[in-house]
Amino acid sequence: MVKEYNIVITGVGGQGILTAANLLGWAALHAGYKVRVGEVHGMSQRFGSVIAYVRFGEDVYGAMVPEGKADVILAFEPVEALRYINYLKEGGLVIANSNPIPPVQVSMGLATYPSMEEIKKIIEEDFKGKLITLDAEKLALEAGNVITTNVVLIGALTQTPGFPLSAEHVKEVIRLSVPKKAVDINMKAFELGVKAAKELLGL
Amino acid sequence: MAKVTDIVLWDKPGERVLLLGNHAIARGALEANIAVFAAYPGTPSSELTDTMAAVAEKAGVYMEYSTNEKVAFETALSAAWSGLRAMTAMKHVGLNVAADTFLSAVGMGVEGGFVIMVADDPSMWSSQNEQDTRVYAKFAQVPVLEPSSPHEAKEMTKYAFELSEKFKHMVILRTTTRISHARGDVVLGELPEEIKQAKRKFGDFKKDPSRFVDVPSNARRFHPIILEKIEKIREELAECPFNWIEGKEDAKVGIIAPGLAYSYVKEALAWLGVDDVKILKLGTPFPVPYKLLEKFFDGLERVLIVEELEPVVEEQVKVWAFDNGIRIPIHGKDYVPRVYEMTTRRAVTAIAKFLGLETPVNFESIDEKYKKVSAIVPPRPPSLCPACPHRNTFYAIKKAAGPNAIFPSDIGCYTLGLLPPLKTVDTTVAMGASIGVAHGLDVALNGVPGEKETKEKKIIVATIGDSTFFHTGLPALANAIYNRSNVVIVVMDNLVTAMTGDQPNPGTGDTPHGPGKRILIEDVAKAMGADFVEVVDPYDIKATYEVMKKAIETEGVSVVVARRICALHRVGEMRRRGEKWPIYTVNEEKCTGCKICINAYGCPAIYWDAEKKKAQVNPLICWGCGGCAQVCPFGAFEVMKEGE
């Protein structure tokens, strides 16, 4: 039994971040852990930057992961990985979807979107983390529906070195949670995420 | 992962489930055999209200979405007067709306348990101010319970009903965003037979004008009764199961942790590896039970109070200590910030400083490294959804009213009209305030008709949502018409209370118990005597523009109802039904790169391809309204295919 495990999930409102957090929370609960999931609803959700926290273990209290304590950041969008990088512990892993969603301010020419090289450099050199990226939408489409993007990413997350929940256990919770007609594509999406992360991590 | 609306009715005592704090409170109310629930939605309280709405029929509970918090308060209060267990829920600022009834009714007491759930929003994730409801509790002399976890929130809800009934006094259950919107493991308790059998409970109102009529001669009796009751409650709370002393019994250092701060203190101490302190865990920040303080202070040499927002506990503890001749150092707001929400970082920093220790992580060095990130990360504020009808309405208003017009607005999704490129929101204060502010500005800038000879009349166009209109817009509209204002009021009617999660309102006519009676906004405006009333579909931008022009030209109060269903709501419904909608794309041969669609319209599904110098549509988030095709002067937006 792990004492405390901290996951930070980031992305853009509407990407299914809260659903992912809830699924992971249930998976941890079913594994017998004490669980906290932190989220924000309402105005801040509408296509803005979103952060959710999933914490579980023998001893967890508050719902928010403090800065410098996240074991892993799962980012649904690359720049949203960087925005919350201060949560990562030294030596932590960042798993990011590689598809940028340019904010309106970038399109208007009021701000610029950093390059993937810049993002990687800050994560790895300044924050001493490791970054892996995968095209989750592409894998979701391969599985059968782009709506399974979050399941691809959850699949990848389970391959984080030291992740306390088994991939099979998380997969089972997802199988029981999605509508019956969507089980097959979700299982496929999960497996594609697992496979991609394994390759990227050299497992 | 079962549906929450199923879980809260599960007859499985002892089962461990994962629930949002708000869902846990709903379950607690059901376990407490609640009879009546009334509320107006408000983040972060809304999931409690929606859960009660979803299960009301199945649990035999009367539930209503009231038109505002004051009405909701009165609905629930009357049930409690009649001997029923009743609850109302609101966000912190909702208590301001209900405050008139709240403060006057305290002294009358209740018969059935009456619980006022108020969700505060420290750091203002979805709010207009940071008020601390515990201050209200002290002002009103009403006990306030504050949970430290979702499970405790459920247990406290049950206890709150019992406490309220025991002392015939109303009780506040105060949460914050980090309880209401935190999921945690919750253990289900027993459900009463009446709830399981969906048996509606009815009350009995015993007439007693000396109690229920607050004429001065009666009201004078109330105040001393209130003060007497609160001292009795303070004594009772020394035995409250949510207040306790833990840690090292003979420690020299003590920490007081009210509400959720207890969780942060526990994590901070574990992170610091400190265990030679005594902790006073307080579930009742007002009134602080003095008997527990006596026990806690015994043997202590220094005390730190780790409290979020206002020093409510700190002031009570310091006054008590002074009165009892206790002269040890008591710290609080000198170590813990008074603004914004509590975090583990804040708790660990305060405790480390207090104990003369290093923090386990060097937060300053993280902040220093983060400066580089702040410099290059583009902002991503929330925005109106793709296909949001409000975007079209704002676009048309701005075009019709011109750049010098003033745009008072209100509380709802449409407050996001503040952001570029729309920038059609000049003021937002409180629910319903758009109309009062519009009228006030008209008086200040233009004067009443015929009063001021002026060449340049300021055009004032207020925007207000359908639900907000019924909430507090109505008296302001009556005032504007009565006092001969010259303003345009645009009711952005998206046929749902959208911001808080799709609740019905009088404009939709639905209730949790079946069809209610629908009230049309245009009928209300006409009946009140508005000088111009018209309904328009904002998906037709040209028609909307023309109606706005006419409204602006009309002397007096013009009311335009811009009616079109909320896009998020519509897309959700269509997905459930397996329906498709058109998806637009950019014909790159026609796109000249003028950027009107981005710099004036600003749909989040449209982005700029800097290499091609063309607009592009993200097909994954285009919801097919076709607004882009209407604003593009070159006809570059075309339907690509039927989507999803």
Image: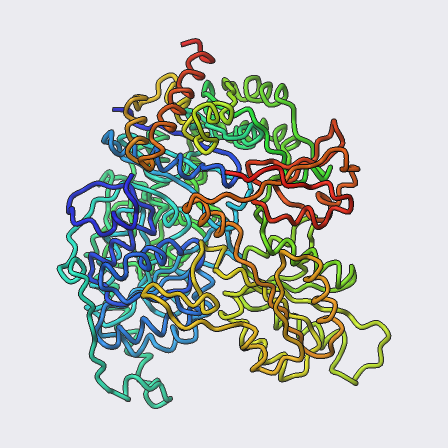
Q: Is residue A115 above or below residue B481?
A: above
> Could you say where residue B286 lies in the image, as x and y percent from the top left?
33, 60
Q: Quadrant of residue B343?
A: top left
- Quadrant where the N terminus of chain B lies? top left
Front-lying residue, A27 or B536: B536
List the single residue furthest toward the right. B455
Q: In the displayed image of the protein, which residue is found farthest to the left? A: B193
Question: On the image, which quarter does residue B210 sit in?
Answer: bottom left
Pick the front one: B592 or B257: B592
Q: Is A65 left or right of B157, judged from the image as shown?
A: right
Q: Whole-percent x and y of residue B157?
A: 26, 57
Outermost residue to the bottom: B217
Whether residue B299 is visible to the viewer of this picture, yes or no, is yes
Provide residue A6's location: percent of width, then percent of height: 38, 29
Q: Classify B479 as above or below B99.
A: below
Q: Position of residue A51 (x, y in %)?
A: 48, 37
Of B126 and A138, which appears nearest the observer? A138
Nearer the observer, B554 or B445: B554
